[in-house]
Image (spheres, helix red, strand yellow):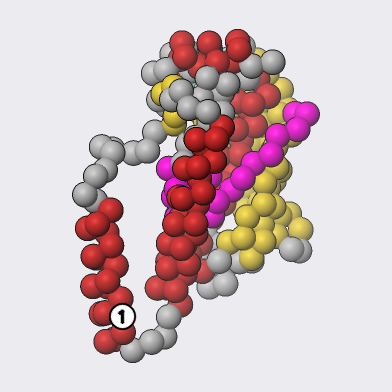
């Protein structure tokens, strides 16, 4: 877990998102089209060549490693490379969690890119989404970043591709540990649930900046 302060204002965040969110959405569309296209091999070959050209163009100037977790002085997070929520990550569905009193929720549309057994959501994808939501739930409610120490998942019945809703709730805290219950539903009801033990790490890169930003936020 590495946090990095990036001192930009809300207008600059919106400006960047106005450019990258449509790009990310286009690539999500591309991923879905590659999986489901039934065009002939020549068309697929031409598509590959054009995609390779675009990839080369984007690689001219790149960050080393991952995108990281920048945040602003007023603690607005920009984890745009995150595998579950990243607004610059076409692999992310993306989950957009909302946080209330002790509860976090989020809904996603899981299409062909998230399939495990035919027509059903991959169990690892559900664990990914649960992991993210319990992480944000514990971090937001206790107001400090938390790592997942243990996440136990019970797959109760198959989850159909399509709309999936998640809900996480803090059930207790003990020193640096926060306990979170999480549930997943498809259109027919609960399909999986989980229990997480979230740990507030003693130290992590950017900790002092995060603490200063928390102190500044009302
Ligand atoms: C608004 C403010 C926020 C700002 C906004 C930020 C938002 C931020 C959102 C982040 C959202 C991320 C969402 C993605 C969630 C992931 O994906 S996190 C990535 C997956 N998890 C990991 O990589 C964790 C890897 N493990 C570790 O780094 C370390 O083992 C840990 C978990 C930090 C614990 O290390 P530690 O602090 O040295 O632990 P330690 O002192 O040995 O033990 C402390 C206590 O925890 C218990 N414990 C330790 N390890 C475990 C374990 N694995 N399982 C259960 N219990 C354990 C110990 O038994 C001990 O309990 P007590 O004896 O006190 O009762």
18 and 34: which is toward the camera: 18
Q: Residue at x 30, y 76 (%)?
A: 47
Residue bearing mark 1: 44
Q: Is residue 90 a member of the stretch shown in magenta?
A: yes
Q: How many tags in the picture?
A: 1
Looking at the image, is 87 positioned above or below residue 123?
above
Q: In the figure, is residue 38 to the left or right of 13? A: left
User: Which quarter of the picture shows residue 160?
Assistant: bottom right
Is ligand 1 less than 8 Å from the beta carbon at label 1?
A: no
Q: In the figure, is residue 170 to the left or right of 155? A: right
Looking at the image, is 206 positioned above or below residue 193?
above
Give the crowd class for mark 1: few <14, some 14-19, many >=20 residues within 10 Å.
few
SS type, badge 1: helix
Looking at the image, is 77 positioned above or below residue 202?
below
Looking at the image, is 120 positioned above or below residue 93?
below
- Percent of width and height locating residue 40: 33, 89
Q: Residue at x 48, y 27 (%)?
A: 8
- Percent of width and height locating residue 146: 54, 24
Res 156 seen here: no
Q: Is residue 24 a member of the stretch shown in magenta?
A: no
Question: What are the residue bounds of the magenta stretch?
Answer: 81-102
- Percent of width and height locating residue 112: 51, 69
């Amino acid at each position: 877990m590495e946090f990095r302060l990036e001192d930009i204002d809300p207008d600059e965040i919106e400006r960047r998102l106005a450019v990258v969110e449509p790009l990310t959405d286009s690539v999500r569309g591309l991923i879905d089209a590659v999986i489901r296209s039934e065009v002939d091999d020549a068309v697929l070959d031409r598509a590959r060549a054009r995609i390779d050209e675009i990839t080369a163009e984007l690689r001219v100037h790149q960050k080393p490693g991952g995108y990281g977790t920048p945040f602003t002085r007023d603690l607005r997070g920009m984890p745009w490379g995150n595998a579950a929520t990243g607004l610059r990550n076409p692999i992310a569905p993306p989950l957009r969690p909302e946080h209330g009193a002790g509860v976090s929720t989020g809904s996603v549309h899981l299409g062909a890119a998230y399939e495990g057994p035919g027509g059903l959501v991959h169990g690892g994808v559900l664990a990914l989404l649960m992991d993210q939501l319990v992480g944000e739930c514990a971090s937001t409610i206790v107001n400090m970043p938390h790592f997942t120490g243990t996440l136990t998942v019970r797959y109760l019945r198959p989850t159909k591709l399509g709309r999936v809703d998640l809900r996480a709730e803090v059930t207790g805290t003990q020193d640096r540990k926060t306990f979170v219950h999480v549930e997943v539903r498809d259109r027919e009801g609960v399909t999986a649930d989980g229990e997480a033990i979230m740990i507030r790490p003693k130290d992590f890169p950017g900790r002092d900046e995060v603490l200063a930003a928390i102190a500044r936020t009302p």
